[in-house]
Image (cartoon, helix red, strand yellow):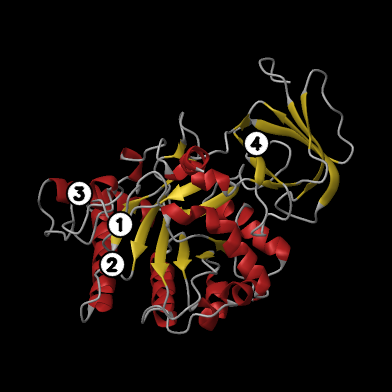
Amino acid sequence: MNGLLAAVVLTGASVFTGEGPLVENATIVIDGNRISAVGPDVRIPEGARVIDAKGAVVTPGLVDAVSRLGVQDVSLESSAVEGTSGPEGGPVRASLRVADTYNPASFTIPVARGGGITSAVVAPRGGVISGQSIWVDLVEEQPIRERSLALHVSVNGMGSKPGARSRAFHVLREALEDARLYRANRGPYITRRLRELSISAADLVAIERALARELKVVVHVDRASDILSVLALVKEHRLDAVLVGVAEGWKVRQDIRRAGVPVLVDSLANLPSSFNRLQARDDNAALLHEAGVPLGLTTLGDAHRAHRLRWSAGNAVADGLPYAAALAAITRVPARAFGIGDAGEIKQGALANLVVWNGDPLELTTWPTHLFIRGEQVELRSRQDLLTERYR
């Protein structure tokens, strides 16, 4: 016991721990902000608050691994969009930090919690090198766990003009080479005895951290040929990379597997909606998983539809992804991809982020009945629910 608050105990549940088979008739003990015990033969601590979860399914809290929650309330209202330098910003914005403008009181967050999401990677947007993301738990008090989580890159960050993709790779290569030169020549740079570099000192410092593998590099890329070019860059500069989007990843899945790079895809983005996704297909996630690629699922930054994350997993199952792999893809895998070791699983010592569902969590007709973040039960009603009740 933590000595301050009574433990919370869930009994009789069917539990997906995030790794391994379903555990039937299990008991979960939440002590403070951690899980202290889980299993079928767990002793209930004296004085604990007991929740009967018989017939319910319990999963780890879902993780939306590329999100715009808390920085984009109204997409078409410029003053409600943050985590970007806007269209007037340059192509390299490595020093931009989402942490500076993240709003934990955003009205998009309760809706996401209603879809079982307890944590998110909130990413910057715009340019070729967009800036630094954060890892947040979806609470209002001290929500940010990692203030400088990863550096985000987009090979489509130069828009759609002729040669934009070539220009994006040129900008990216130049920035990486300049940061490498800066790292080896800080003194001459400070005393202005080094040639002029293409980006600011603040951006150089951020990219240098990526070269030192202190920051992960998350590359948003869809086209198969672009994926191969990105993998070559990752190998050349020894980057700790994650690929996002990867709509045509099935075509080069063996190359991705050999590179050992995790991917984050949206199984709902399965149509040839642009020239970057001409060969998108329904079973992309299943084929990547079958090839041995570490697979996570994401909503690709749609703040208003983050609650659809579990539906993306359900679609992936319908198209051939094993059920356990689909659940892991929205819990354990994205947490591991970003180096968060105590999230995405229900096990002793893990952070107590978990969801109680009234049925199969990947079905449209089920919903959460209880949601815990850092061991505290969180309200599931959103502004939309309140408006519905008012005007029904």
Residue matched to label 2: 157
Question: Residue 95 in the image: x percent, y percent?
Answer: 27, 48
Q: CA distance from mark 1 to mark 3?
A: 16 Å
Q: Secondary structure at mark 3?
A: helix
The tag earlier along the polypeptide, 1 or 2, is 1
The tag earlier along the polypeptide, 3 or 2, is 2
Q: Label 3 near label 4: C-beta < 8 Å?
A: no
Q: Amino acid at mark 4?
A: Ala
Question: Residue 41 in the image: x percent, y percent?
Answer: 90, 37
Q: CA distance from mark 1 to mark 2?
A: 8 Å
The vertical placement of 99 against 329, above or below, is above
Query: Which of the numbered marks, if any, corresponds to residue 237?
Result: none
Q: Is residue 28 left or right of residue 120?
A: right
Q: CA distance from mark 1 to mark 4?
A: 32 Å
Residue drawn at the location 54% of the way across and 44% of the way down: 113
Q: Residue furthest top?
A: 3
Residue matched to label 3: 201
User: Is residue 47 something one can see in this rendering?
Assistant: yes
Q: Label 2 near label 1: C-beta < 8 Å?
A: yes
Residue drawn at the location 77% of the way across and 22% of the way down: 48
Residue matched to label 4: 352
Q: Residue furthest front?
A: 392
User: Is residue 337 something one can see in this rendering?
Assistant: no
Residue drawn at the location 35% of the way across and 47% of the way down: 73
Q: Amino acid at mark 3?
A: Ala
Q: CA distance from mark 3 to mark 2?
A: 21 Å
Mark 1 vs mark 3, foreground winner is 1
Question: Residue 215 in the image: x percent, y percent?
Answer: 41, 51
The tag earlier along the polypeptide, 1 or 4, is 1
Query: Which of the numbered marks, if any, corresponds to residue 130?
Result: 1
- Give whichever of 200, 317 is nearer the camera: 317
For label 2, count other residues whose C-alpha is less than 10 Å away and answer few (under 14), some (14-19) or many (20+).
Answer: many
